[in-house]
Amino acid sequence: MEKILEAAPQITTWKNFPTDTEGVVGFVYLIRNNHPDAIKRFYIGKKQLLKRVKRKPLKGKTRNRISFVDNDVEKYWGSSKELLSDIEKYGIEHFSREVIEVCYSKFHMSFSEIDWQMKCRVLFDDRFFNGIINCRLGVIPKGYVDIERDPVILKL
């Protein structure tokens, strides 16, 4: 299935993707199934812009080397197996991806994702591919200010 997504030309890009990613850790996104014959379904998730890579220590050293590399955001289509099978079934051109919130910390990203999922009631609504809500939150960062999220703006 991953081979199909990699081999397919990236017809759709991210709608509302930030042009300046300075200080941006990641974003919360919405994927829509736009196929005319399919039931309109959605998926809400989060994606980090950079991923952490751990490498072996240099000769004579003991600490692992940590670096951050691009996370292939352009090729990403979610982690739901049901969503990925629908993409394979209907074709990648019938799906759209949009950024619904840009996040400036991991806490912000995780909290925003779970807040959007709860407000859209993704576990109770059959229109959503989301089958699980999994979240791990730590201490609220200093200076973090939460915003009000309204599912009406998503036009589901």
Image (spheres, rainbow, N blue to C red):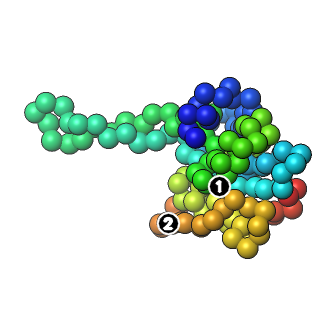
In this picture, residue 123 sits left or right of residue 52 = right
Residue 111 position in % (x across, y down): 60, 63
Mark 2 vs mark 1: which is more N-terminal? 1
Q: Residue at x 68, y 26 (%)?
A: 9
Residue furthest to the bottom in view is: 124
Picture quadrant of residue 62: top left
| Residue in the foreground of this view, choosing between 38 and 40 | 38
Q: Secondary structure at mark 2?
A: loop
Three-letter amino acid code at disc 2? Arg
Residue 101 position in % (x across, y down): 70, 51
Against 20, is 107 above or below?
A: below
Q: Residue at x 56, y 34 (%)?
A: 3
Three-letter amino acid code at disc 1? Glu
In this picture, residue 112 sits left or right of residue 149 = left
Picture quadrant of residue 93: top right
* The N terminus: image quadrant: top right
Q: Secondary structure at mark 1?
A: helix
| Residue that mark 2 sits on | 136
* The C terminus: image quadrant: bottom right
- Numbered circles on residues, count: 2
| Residue in the foreground of this view, choosing between 60 and 77 | 77
Residue 130 position in % (x across, y down): 66, 62
Residue 34 in view, yes or no: yes
Against 91, is 140 above or below?
A: below
| Residue in the foreground of this view, choosing between 48 and 78 | 78
| Residue that mark 1 sits on | 82
